[in-house]
Image: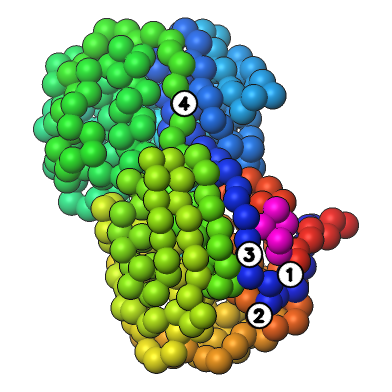
Amino acid sequence: MDKILVRGGKPLRGSIPISGAKNATLPAMAASLLTSDRVHLTNIPHLRDVTTMVELLGQHGCGITIDEKLGVEVDGAGVNNCRAPYDLVRTMRASILVMGPLLARHGHAEISLPGGCAIGSRPVDIHLSGLEKMGATIELSGGYIRASAKRLRGAIIPMNLVTVTGTENLMMAASLAQGQTILENAAREPEVVDLANCLNRMGARISGAGSSTITIDGVDTLHGCTHAILPDRIETGTFMVAGAITGGDVTLTGADPETLTDPIIRLRECGVGIDTGPDWIRVRGPSRPVAIDLETQPYPGFPTDLQAQMMVLMTLAPGDSRIVETIFENRFMHVSELQRLGADIRIAGNTAYVRGVDHLLGAPVMATDLRASASLVLAGLVARGETLLSRVYHIDRGYERIEEKFLALGANIQRLSN
Ligand code: UD1
């Protein structure tokens, strides 16, 4: 299994391109199941989760062409299997995104229940009750969700919690339903808007994406389209923290500052210099960051997917900071690893109390989930001495060639393969 070795202490300098967003790519690929035409997606990131989605669509019967220019074309004409097997779903929970499209176009879907994961129990009850409101029959047996419906009907669906993939699943299903669907308390994430744009290019009639009420007027068929995936705001935020924490000067190109309004405000409060243009962000790190309090919230609030990275910044900010995780109940696994590097962090319930230390000291650490592992690389970049990160496969799920991008910024980092 690969490891990443980081020797800390070099301020990062230079410019790197931001990749397409993983969390917009996966739903757009799933949306291709809604049509028998070809859906051509560009600006696709080269990630393990994308490969898993290619595998999943392939076993459903889709034809898939990948070009060398970060494009994927999915041909859904030959779909002949509506079962998403346990072996794929357990490696990527976002596999649940094929449920809405398969049910809407083929009348049934059989999806392995995702089960627990490192960052909490993560149920899918809101996806299921929404589909039931649209007339689907849902059964759970043998570890599988079995959903069936002759044709889904439009419905008013109030969602008691903001769920990103739940909103996406229901929006895709409703696109081919008979009549109008209204999703209330919908997720407002930019990736939801990107999916709505992609679906509208396919002939769907969706309005209100980006607000908490989304209206979908169902159509009989959808057609192919070409759609460019939006930039990854979580990758962008991760490299912004990297520039900040190393006292560096980093420019991120092909980024979308509008999707990072809150993180930019919060980083400025930490003393980080940030300039933005239409598609770039320049970050200049302070000599020492300023401690701030932070609470994760659904978009447009501070993203849970950047919580671990911000915590690393706070470990070096003189004074006290309080970080509250409101989205996932068990998303502090990075804390024990950061403590091994000398961070002073105490957890009580869903709150982490961080007291800034003078410096971190390199040590062997273990990646536990995708964003937690990115935060450990950031810690390694600023820690004195060597940090050896194992279980790097977690990072490869969501960051494209992370060590190559850091190398381009002058970091002392290498991947060790064995
Ligand atoms: C998506 C993102 C993930 C991000 C998360 C929150 C993708 C592929 N993944 O995950 O990177 O961390 O949004 O921004 O886009 N919940 C329920 N019942 C449900 C659905 C969700 O109780 O049916 C709960 C979850 O357990 C969690 C909260 O709602 O506590 C939000 O989860 P959700 O937005 O659904 O996360 P994902 O869509 O899985």
At 53% from the left edge and 53% from the top edge, which residue is drawn?
251
* 269 or 210: nearer the viewer: 269
Residue 249 in sight from this viewpoint: yes
Q: Which residue is mark 2?
A: 383
How far apart are the two marked residues, 2 and 3, measured between alpha carbons?
A: 14 Å
Mark 4 in CB contact with mark 1 (< 8 angstroms):
no
The image quadrant that residue 292 belongs to is bottom left
How far apart are the two marked residues, 3 and 1, measured between alpha carbons?
A: 13 Å
Q: Is residue 128 left or right of residue 278?
A: left
> What amino acid is labelled 3 in the image?
Leu
How far apart are the two marked residues, 4 and 2, measured between alpha carbons?
A: 38 Å
User: Does label 2 or label 3 sit earlier along the sequence?
Assistant: 3
Decide if ligand 1 comes within 8 Å of the CB at mark 1: no
Q: Is residue 300 above or below residue 10?
A: above
- Report helix, strand or loop for mark 4: strand
Residue 327, position in %: x, y? 33, 62
Instruction: Give the number of the mark in front: 4 or 3.
Output: 3
At 84% from the left edge and 56% from the top edge, which residue is drawn?
417
User: Does label 4 or label 2 sit earlier along the sequence?
Assistant: 4
- Report helix, strand or loop for mark 1: strand
How far apart are the two marked residues, 4 and 1, measured between alpha carbons?
A: 34 Å
Q: Which residue is mark 3?
A: 12
Residue 272, position in %: x, y? 42, 69
Mark 2 in CB contact with mark 1 (< 8 angstroms):
yes
How far apart are the two marked residues, 4 and 3, measured between alpha carbons?
A: 29 Å
Q: Which residue is mark 1?
A: 6
> What amino acid is labelled 1 in the image?
Val
